Image: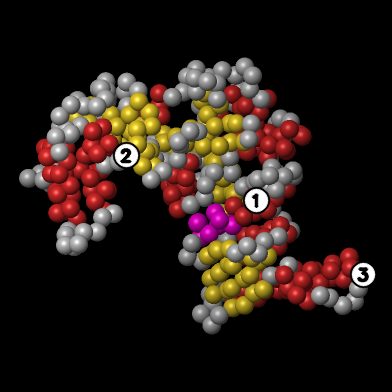
Amino acid sequence: MKIDSHYWSDTDQTVLLMNLFEYLHFTLEEETTQYLRYSKERKHYIVIHTDSGYYYYSCAHPEEKLRASDSIASFCSGIVTRDDSSIWERITRKYEEYLASGLDTTPKHILAKVAYDFNHFEIIPTTMQGVGLMSLYQEALTIPALANTMAMDSEGHLLFPLYNDENVLCGYLCDTPMGVEPYTYSNHISGIWYTGIPKKTDQLILFSTPQEALAFYVQYQPQNTICMACTSINYTTNTIVTKFKKVTKAKKVWFSFTGNTPIQGYMMDLQQIAQMNALDFMLNSTDQYLRVVLRTPDTVVFSKFYRKVQAFNESIVTYYKKYNKTKSVYQDLVNKYSISIKQTEVGDIYCRVPIEASAIKFMICNYQKHFLPNTIGVLKPQEVNWYRDFTKNGKKKSTIDYKTLKIAV
C-alpha cells in the first residue's frame, strides 16, 4: 500500500460527495454549474468535480482539497461510542453504513468538471469600475502598488481580497454603508489583506481595515512598505504577519489599529502585542479592567516602568483634586482609574489597567518604550482614524515623519 493511501482510498475516488454531505446533514447553500456550497456548524465548504473524482475544501483553505473519508473522519471525531471504539473503526463503520444505504448511486446535482486547483473565490470578481467610487478609492486605483488590492462583484460592491497563511485567496471584505465587513460567507478570521509587495521591503504596517490602510497609503505613499489589514487579531493572522516579515526580510513592524473611538484602536494594539510577544505578555479582560502579565528578568527595566506607573497614578490624584476643587480624595474612585502593579519573586509583573483610553494609551506607550525591541512600534493618526485624516488633509506627497506619528503620552 502507498504511504499516502489508506483503506478508503479507492472508494474516495468514486463517492458522490454531494450525496454524502446531505447524508451527514450538511446544508446546501448555493448551487452553480461549477461548484456546490454547503454549510455546517457555521463553516462553509465547496464541493467540486474533477477528472479524478469529487473533492471538497473549506472556504478558509481552498488549497487543501479533501475527500469523502475526510468528511466522515471529521463527523466521527465528535462521536463517542459506548464500546469505546477507535477512530479508525468509527470511520470504517460510518463509511460502510453510507455505502450500504443505497444513496451513492445517482448524483443529486450535476457539476461541470473543473481543475484540481479550482478556487471559487477567484471567479467572483468582475471588471473593476472606478466610476461612482469615493475619492479615496479613485486615488488608490492610480497608484500601482494598490491597483490589484481591490475588486468588484457583479452587483458593483467593492471587494478587498483576503489571503490565508498559504497566501491563497480565501475570501473578501466588502465596503458597505456600515463600514468594511466580511463579504457574504467569507471567513475574515483566517485571512489578511495587503498592498503590493515592493522589490525591497523595509517595514510592515498593520491596520484594522483595508480602508484605513488605503487612507494612510494614499496620503503618505510610503516607500519600501507593505500595508496590511487584520480585521481579526488571532494566532492565524499573526502567523501570516510573521511569515511576511521573514520572507520579505522587513526590519520593522508598525501597529496602527484604529476604530470609531481611540480606545478601540488601543485595544487592538494590545491584542497584537499579546500575539507577537505571547511568552512575555499575557492579556485578558473583565468588564472594567484589563489584566496584563509582563515578564522581564531585568530589574532595572521594572524599576523604570514602576516609576512611570506611579507618576501616572499621582496624576490621577492631582487632577481629581483640581477638578473637584478639594484637598481630599474619594479613594475608591481614584483607585478605579489608577493602574495597580506588583511583581512576583519569579519576575512576573501583574498590572490591572482600567478600561479607559488614557490608561490604555499609557500602557501601550510605556510597554513599547521599556519592553519591546525597536523593531516594533505603534503609529497613530492625528484624527480618530486614518480615513478621517485623509478626508481632512487630502493627498500628501511629503516625506513621512514617523517620529511625529509614533504614539506618545
- Along the line of sight, which residue is nearer the eye, 128 or 23? 23
Left or right: residue 109 compared with residue 124: left
Q: Which residue is mark 1?
A: 264
For disc 2, the neighbor class at 10 Å (few under 14, some 14 to 19, many from 20) is some
- x and y percentages locating residue 339 in the rendered image: 69, 70
Magenta span covers which residues? 269-277
Residue at image position (73%, 67%) is 337
Residue flagged by tag 3: what amino acid is it?
A: Lys
The amino acid pointed to by label 1 is: Gln
* Residue shown at 17% from the left, 58% from the top: 86
Taking the image as shown, residue 66 lies to the left or right of residue 136, namely left
Image position, residue 278 (x, y; %):
48, 62
Using a 10 Å C-alpha cutoff, classify the residue at mark 1 as few (fewer than 14 neighbours), some (14 to 19) or many (20 or more). some
Secondary structure, mark 2, is loop
| 147 shown above or below 336 | above
The label nearer to you, 3 versus 2, is: 2
Q: Quadrant of residue 342?
A: bottom right
Between marks 2 and 1 in the image, the one whose residue lies nearer the viewer:
2
Q: Nearer the viewer, residue 190 or 21?
A: 21
Vertical placement of 174 versus 240: above or below? above
Using the numbered discs, state the Cα–Cα distance from disc 1 to disc 3 in whole angstroms: 32 Å
- Secondary structure mostly seen in magenta is helix
- Vertical placement of 147 versus 311: above or below? above
Q: Nearer the viewer, residue 342 or 142?
A: 342
Q: Amino acid at mark 2?
A: Phe
Q: Where does the C terminus fall, quadrant-wise?
A: bottom right
- Alpha-carbon distance for marks 3 and 2? 66 Å
**Residue that numbered label 3 is attached to:** 325
Q: Position of residue 36 (x, y in %)?
A: 33, 29
Q: Nearer the viewer, residue 119 or 46?
A: 46
Is 21 left or right of 369, judged from the image as shown? left
Q: Would you name the residue on which mark 2 appears?
A: 26
